[in-house]
Structure formats: structure tokens, C-alpha cells
Image (tube, rainbow, N blue to C red):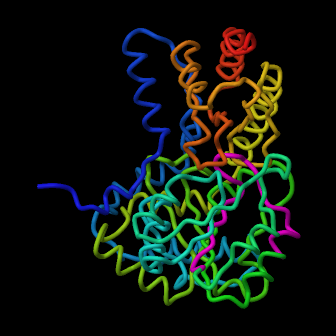
Amino acid sequence: MQLAQRMSRMGVESAFEVLLRARALEKQGRNVIHLEIGEPDFPTPANVVEAGRRALSEGWTKYGPPQGLPDLREAIAAYISRTRDIKVGAEHVCVVPGAKPIMYFTMTALLEPGDEVILPDPSFPIFESMIRFLEAVPVRIPLAQERGFSFDLDILRSKLSPKTKMVVLNFPANPTGGTIPSADVEAMARMFRERDIIILSDEIYSRILYDGAHVSIASFPGMLEKTVILDGFSKTYSMTGWRLGYGVMPTWLADAVVKLMVNSNSCTAGFTQRAGLEALTGPQDSVDAMVGEFRRRRDAICKGLNEIPGFNCSVPAGAFYAFPNVKDTGLPSKKLADMLLNDAGVACLDGAAFGQCGEGFLRFSYANSLENILEAIQRIKGIADRWNRR
């Protein structure tokens, strides 16, 4: 018996591979600083944990509606309507176990073999994995450092074709931390408005933004019915293990996503949804405090990386990733990432794992303590002579 051929088209996340290698080194007695995993190091807020405990004791442990609990969907609709300046209802919301199912389900529901999907390069690798799995065609838009890792609208316009079925947006972005200026988002909306395409707008980092307010493409005229907003609780509320995400979409697509939920997960755990309801409607102080600490770490890691020979790190506008250009080290980014792990005990990711345009960059997650970040910088400086002599 062999696996179906389609499995050969499915990719993975290199972060988990690097984590396993780092754990293996730790078992050998090595000390490793983990800057590879995109997971907030803060505890889930106490009020959210208590809501989860209370839900368990109250019996929220049975099957629930495949689309999600009505009161949570209503709260999500109110939150999205308020923060994106649009009008959506509970019927537009699908609650799923984590944010990735929204990628999986919407692409599965929409894409046919040969359809073209425009996506940023570099970007979260599961986008391209799903596109290829469904035999659609990824069309990459290079994100240049000198543009703040934003889209070049002329290139984007040139890549649109009659085969374009979907455009993927992600900002603030993983892995670059870049965002898209509001004027450019509006220009994109004008570009897409008359086309028969869907925009998959990954807004999972929308609350982790250091300056200004997040602007969703769904907020521009004519775009609400063409946009799927992907969001969730993992990053904003440090709830990665709770597996709770959602999509906001046109009702005809929500019906298809519910059908896929029925055929895969049945429903999202009720007690996690009750915790999510508390996260969304309860005090937001913990979010503000977390973003403030991320800002402090961002400033420290960018300053430190820019002091390393061969590194050139732009200051990210959001998320919690630094994405330095390391081309001047003269080393391929994969080789450099391996060297930092094996010789310096600093785990980070090769930028090429996020797309062809990520070659020559590294991704560092600063979801770790400031003390560990500063120690990681010192360790990297300690071995910099290995490429500085080249």
C-alpha cells in the first residue's frame, strides 16, 4: 500500500522540524534559545482560563453546531463589524479548530486544478502547500525589503489573469512583519472589485500592530462579498493550544465550509469556544500589555541584529518576527540557520522555507524573553567571525 499521489504535493512547516532538532540538542545537554516558533510566550489570560474551566464544569463537553456556538459567532460578528467598519452577522461566521482550517476549507471549496492563486513571496508556507495539494497554480508576488515587504502594485496587476481565482493577503505578515499601506489596500480593492475572484485575507496578527490601525480590504466598497477574513485567538490571546479560529465570509461560502466541517471535525470544542467568548468580550488589558512587550523586544532584537556583521534587519510593523537580510554573510540562509543552531545554540528559520524570495533571509521569532533575545544576539556575535573572514 502506498500513499495517494496527492500527498506528495503537500508541504510542512519548517518551524516544527527545527524545533525537533533543537529539542534533540537539548536532550544532549545543549542550551538552545528558541527563536523559531511563532507562539506567544505569555500565559493565556487568567479570565480566559477560568472561563474554560467553568465551561468544563458546566458540561460544555458535548457536540455543538458545526458552524460554531451562536453566541460566539454573534460576538465575532460584532467585533469584526466594529474593527473593520463593515456589517456582518453571525451567519457569515464559521468557527473552526484553529485558523488553518479556514485556509484548508476555503481553498478546498473554491479551487479547481489549474486555477491560479496569487500569494506573497515570502509567506506562510501552508498557503502554497494547500494550493499545490489542490492542483492549483501558485503565482508569487515578490515582497522586497526596500518596499517594507509590501506588494508592488504594478507587479500584482501584471500577474492577474483570467485564470486568477484567489488572491492571498497576509498583513501584518508572517514571516516579514511587514504590512500594506492603507492607500495600497484601497488600490488593490479597485483592482479586484470587478473581477470574479475571492480574497483570502489572513488577519491573524491584526491586533499585533505597533503603529496605526489595521485596515482590512473587506472594508472597501464592493469587497465584503469577495473577501474571506481569517482570524483567531492563538496569537492575540496566547491561546495556541486551545485550537480556536474563525472565518468571516459570504453566506454561500460559509455553507460550504460548514459541510466540510461536518465531514472532518464535526464541530469545534464547546469549552474552548466559551473561553474564546470571554477572550473577545472580557478585559483586553493583557493584549495591550503583550503588544507593548513585543514592541520592546522588537526594538532590542532589530538593534542587536543590525550590529552583527552581514546582517541588515528592517524594523517590522507588526506580528512578532524579525526578518534580517543576511546575504552579506556570503552564506546560503539554510547553511547559516544550521550554523546558528548547531554552533551558537540559537534556533531560527531559513527564510527560503517561506518562498523563493526568502532566500538570503532568516526569521527570528521574538516571542521569547528579552533576556534570552539579548543572549541570542551575543551568541551570534560570538561566531560571526566565521563568515566575517570570507
Q: Which residues are magenta?
A: 164-186
Q: Quadrant of residue 36?
A: top right
Q: Is residue 193 left or right of residue 64?
A: right
Depth check, front residue: 272 or 331: 331
Q: Is residue 307 left or right of residue 359?
A: right
Task: Answer above or below: position of 280 versus 165.
Answer: above
Depth check, front residue: 94 or 308: 308
* Quadrant holding the N terminus: bottom left
Task: Answer above or below: position of 372 versus 267.
Answer: above
Depth check, front residue: 244 or 326: 326
Please say whether residue 272 is one of the residues in the magenta stretch: no
* Quadrant holding the C terminus: top right
Q: Residue at x 31, y 58 (%)?
A: 7
Task: Answer above or below: position of 42 versus 151.
Answer: above
Where residue 209 appears, as percent x and y from the top left, is 77, 51
Q: Residue at x 51, y 59 (%)?
A: 128
Depth check, front residue: 315 or 239: 315
Where residue 2 appears, as percent x and y from the top left, is 16, 55
Q: Residue at x 63, y 61 (%)?
A: 140
Where residue 285 appears, as percent x and y from the top left, is 71, 48
Q: Quadrant of residue 196?
A: bottom right
Task: Answer above or below: position of 170 versus 64.
Answer: above
Please say whether residue 175 is one of the residues in the magenta stretch: yes
Furthest residue toward front? 390
Q: Is residue 191 left or right of residue 112?
A: right
Where residue 127 appears, as percent x and y from the top left, is 52, 60
Q: Residue at x 88, y 70 (%)?
A: 183
